[in-house]
Image (tube, rainbow, N blue to C red):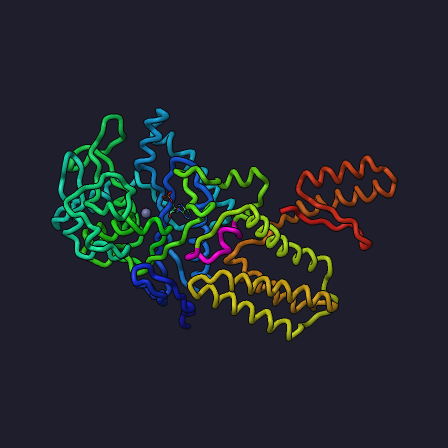
């Protein structure tokens, strides 16, 4: 029997500036590298826009039938981490561990599916020095004052990804910081010579530490091979980070590094990029403390096409909350109005099948999330219309359940269910009804308050008391 071939996936490739079909080196298996967090503080929701979008990409590829091997690095040595260590008198472990732990908690809260590998930079110093040795051999480096630099004019094609103009390249001039602008396109640092009070590792160039760009070249090629399929990040990564990764990797191996590059636009606040340095950021924890639901935050970050900027507002978050509530309300209504008949409503089934198709097609078209969500909420409308007309037979409910499974395999926005907890809540509602019958209103109010405190909202209807979870 032949294996199922994955469906077509079309993506916008930053390298070619066009929409292309994704054709992995190994048919059916996408090797994906996603630049990960620098762990000197909590990630802000701008960072999570990038990670949630990468989750959308990963899950879409899987829905279309691809196998995905994803690597997300943890940058645990970098200029900002060194600064934090020096400012606060911390060891490397003290400066980074709390934020590594927080990162994994946060991605779980946002239902970001785990990558296959989360390598840490400090565990890959050896691999980084193998790259610098190969670059040295090919005449692409030079040393100056204890640091090693990449000679950009010795590498043909420097600037291809970021469309750098020849005039912008200042060969021979050096830049030591990891982050700089296009108008500072100079020879960049691969290995930074040791400075008093800084953590360091031995190397052929003396004690020192790696530059940030080198870290990603080493970790991506170690886990995905010298040539792999897809590399992603935010648009701020295009230059210099990804440009330098290409130069280092291709310079060292002589092989093409990555075929497809994808970049997400920024999460903005009042027209500016959300960034720690600007102080205009919210962490996930800030929003949870204000009572916002993780699923609503996930939908907010997911819900805008990744190549367009997303402006963060609390109105936007409130809208995402009500959309998640619409999904939950449909589930509650279906439970409350059980199927009266067996069999299928063929019309309903075929309309739902068309929505599923629309959902897949939209995502396969460079992750067109607006159309994909249109298909989901269109389905929700179909369900309410069918229930308004009378009923939805049991076979069609199964069709619907299958469709919702497809939607949530990518969106992952369904409410958590816990049968034990549901039974406990229903028992409390029963006790409250008993108390009300006995006109013991103090007790019935106490039970309602207890449920409210647990996020359960009650509604007394002519058919009895119904409940739903507050998001
Ligand atoms: P950093 O920890 O700054 O290296 O960022 C980690 C990831 O988050 C990178 O892929 C960045 O491109 C991305 N990123 C940072 N700020 C934002 C933002 N405001 N909106 C979207 N992505 C961002
Ligand atoms: Zn990176």
The image shows residue 232, relative to residue 342, as above or below, that is above
Picture quarter with the N terminus: bottom left
As drawn, is 389 to the left or to the right of 220?
Answer: right
The image shows residue 468, relative to residue 228, as above or below, that is above
Q: Residue at x 57, y 70 (%)?
A: 353
Q: Which residue is drawn at 70% across and 58% down?
A: 333
Single out the residue that lies furthest toward the right: 438
**Whether residue 114 can be seen here:** no
Specify the segment rendered in magenta.
Answer: 298-308
**Whether residue 256 can be seen here:** yes
**Image location of residue 115, percent across then percent down:** 41, 50
**Image location of residue 123, percent across then percent down:** 30, 40
As drawn, is 255 to the left or to the right of 6?
Answer: left
The reply to whether the magenta stretch includes residue 174 is no
The reply to whether the magenta stretch includes residue 307 is yes
Instruction: Please identify the quarter of the rendering in which residue 355 is found.
Output: bottom right
**Image location of residue 329, percent across then percent down:** 66, 55
Report the number of numbered marks.
Answer: 0
**Image location of residue 387, percent across then percent down:** 71, 65
Which of these two is toward me, 144 or 467? 144
Instruction: Please identify the quarter of the rendering in which residue 205 is found.
Output: top left
């Amino acid at each position: 029997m032949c294996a199922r071939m994955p469906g077509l996936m079309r993506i916008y490739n930053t390298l070619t500036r066009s929409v292309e079909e994704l054709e992995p080196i190994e048919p059916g298996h996408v090797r994906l590298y996603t630049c990960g967090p620098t762990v000197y503080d909590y990630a802000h929701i701008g960072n999570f826009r990038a990670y949630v979008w990468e989750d959308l990409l990963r899950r879409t590829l899987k829905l279309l039938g691809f196998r995905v091997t994803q690597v997300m690095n943890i940058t645990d040595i970098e200029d900002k981490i060194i600064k934090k260590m020096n400012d606060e008198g911390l060891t490397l472990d003290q400066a980074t561990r709390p934020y590594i732990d927080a990162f994994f908690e946060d991605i779980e809260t946002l239902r970001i599916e785990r990558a296959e590998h989360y390598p840490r930079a400090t565990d890959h110093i050896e691999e980084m020095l193998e790259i610098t040795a190969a670059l040295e051999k090919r005449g692409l480096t030079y040393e100056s004052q204890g640091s090693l630099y990449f000679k950009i004019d010795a590498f043909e094609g420097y600037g291809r990804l970021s469309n750098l103009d020849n005039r912008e390249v200042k060969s021979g001039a050096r830049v030591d910081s990891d982050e700089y602008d296009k108008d500072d396109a100079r020879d960049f640092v691969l290995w930074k010579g040791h400075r008093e009070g800084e953590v360091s590792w031995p190397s052929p160039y003396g004690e020192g530490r790696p530059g940030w760009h080198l870290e990603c070249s080493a970790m991506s090629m170690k886990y995905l091979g010298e040539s792999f399929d897809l590399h992603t990040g935010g648009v701020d990564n295009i230059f210099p980070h990804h440009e330098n990764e290409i130069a280092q990797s291709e310079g060292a191996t002589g092989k093409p590094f990555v075929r497809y590059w994808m970049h997400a636009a920024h999460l903005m606040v009042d027209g500016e990029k959300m960034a720690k340095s600007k102080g205009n950021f919210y962490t996930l924890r800030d929003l949870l403390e204000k009572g916002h639901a993780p699923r609503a935050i996930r939908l907010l970050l997911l819900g805008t096409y990744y190549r367009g900027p997303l402006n963060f507002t609390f109105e936007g978050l409130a809208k995402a909350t009500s959309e998640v509530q619409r999904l939950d309300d449909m589930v509650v209504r279906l439970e409350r109005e059980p199927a009266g008949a067996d069999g299928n409503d063929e019309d309903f089934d075929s309309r739902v099948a068309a929505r599923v198709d629309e959902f897949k097609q939209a995502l396969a078209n460079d992750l067109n999330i607006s159309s994909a969500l249109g298909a989901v909420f269109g389905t929700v409308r179909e369900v309410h219309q069918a229930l308004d007309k009378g009923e939805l037979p049991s076979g069609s409910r199964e069709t619907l359940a299958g469709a919702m499974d497809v939607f949530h395999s990518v969106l992952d926005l369904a409410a958590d269910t816990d049968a034990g907890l549901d039974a406990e809540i229903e028992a409390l509602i029963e006790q409250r009804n008993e108390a009300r019958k006995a006109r013991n209103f103090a007790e019935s109010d106490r039970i309602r308050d207890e449920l409210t405190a647990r996020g359960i909202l009650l509604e007394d209807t002519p058919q009895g008391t119904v409940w739903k979870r507050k998001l």
